[in-house]
Amino acid sequence: MAQRPQKKLFTRKKTCRFCGDKELAINYKDVKTLRNFVSERGKIIPRRIIGTCATHQRQLCEAIKQARQIAFLPYSGSAQG
Amino acid sequence: MLFFNLLALCKQQSVRAETCEGIVLRKKRESMRRNHMRRYETIFILRPSAGEEEINKVIGSTTQIILDEQGSIIELNKWGMKKLAYLIKKESLGYYVFCDFAGTPDAVAEIERKFRIDDLVLKYMTIKTAGSINQEEIQLAITAVSEKATAVVDGDADDTEAELLVEEEQEEVADEE
């Protein structure tokens, strides 16, 4: 790995949002929660920035892709709704 | 000796020699596959220009396919007009219909085939939520849905649910267990 001056720039968040709060369920129909994990351009925000755990990030990605398929979320560009 | 030769012959002609036991097992497997219920969620988007009866026709044919294969509908929900996140076939609005049902994979294939032909249906998506489901779980799900429906009606109206249409169908499903 190349030596970079800022090795630990992104501080690791304490806990994954879904692991901490058991009631938060990842569902492709729940557009409001999903929108928190999608950037302004509609791209999925990486896990290292938000701090979700690997399992939940995978479930999130699947849910976001399903929501995109039925036009709840856009593939790219800001959401018009 | 003779049996061995027969087997060798069959292998040459790439035909499997089927014993009586094999036939029984195969038929049992096929019947199990046909009656095996899985839980699916289907969302389909209809054109905004579709009239009420056309929407009901599409929904009716979909439910008919499910029930023909001895499936059961757990929840049928019309979410109504919504703004699409991107243009689908030049349309920016769509009429969403949600269906949660237990059915066979053949039913799902037939439903999707119908959707592909129909001009009214802009988009559809079917997701499998459970690999196998038996009658008791179906009943539990149906009651859970109806309870949620009454809770919503009694309390404050949820802004996501425009119309609530709950259908309960009881069909005799061959118990595979």
Image: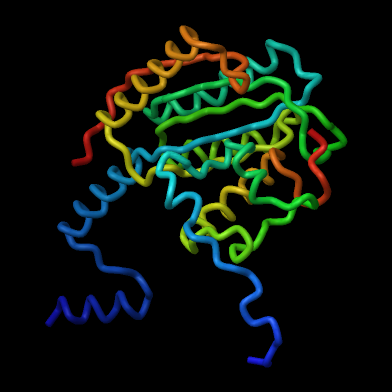
Residue B164: x %, y % from top left:
54, 14
The front one of B175 and A58 is A58
Tell me the residue at 34%/19% (across/down): B143
Which of the 4 quarters of the picture holds residue B18?
bottom left
Where residue A16 appears, as percent x and y from the top left, is 49, 56
Left or right of B83 in this view: A32: left
Residue B123 position by quadrant? top right
* Residue at the outermost left position: B1
Q: Which residue lies furthest to the bottom in this view?
A: A2
Q: Position of residue A29 (x, y in %)?
A: 58, 36
> Which one is nearer the viewer's eye here, B124 or A4?
A4
Q: How many marks?
A: 0
Vertical order, A5 against B115 (above or below): below
Q: Residue at x 70, y 11 (%)?
A: B52
Q: Where residue A37 appears, x then y in whole percent?
A: 64, 50
Is A59 left or right of B133, judged from the image as shown?
A: right
Q: In this view, does A42 lie above or below B146?
A: below
Q: Quadrant of the N terminus of chain B?
A: bottom left
* Residue B104 sits in quarter: top left
- Residue at horizontal 70%, vertical 35%? B117
Task: Looking at the picture, tell me which residue is in the foreground, A28 or B13.
Answer: A28
Work out which residue is located at the far right of the displayed protein and give it. B90
Report the residue that reaches farthest toward the top: B154
* Closer-to-camera residue (B111/B28): B111
Q: At 84% from the left edge and 32% from the top edge, which residue is drawn?
A: B91
Q: Quadrant of the C terminus of chain B?
A: top left
- Name the colour scheme: rainbow
Instruction: Give the left or right position of residue B153, taking residue A38 as reference.
Output: left
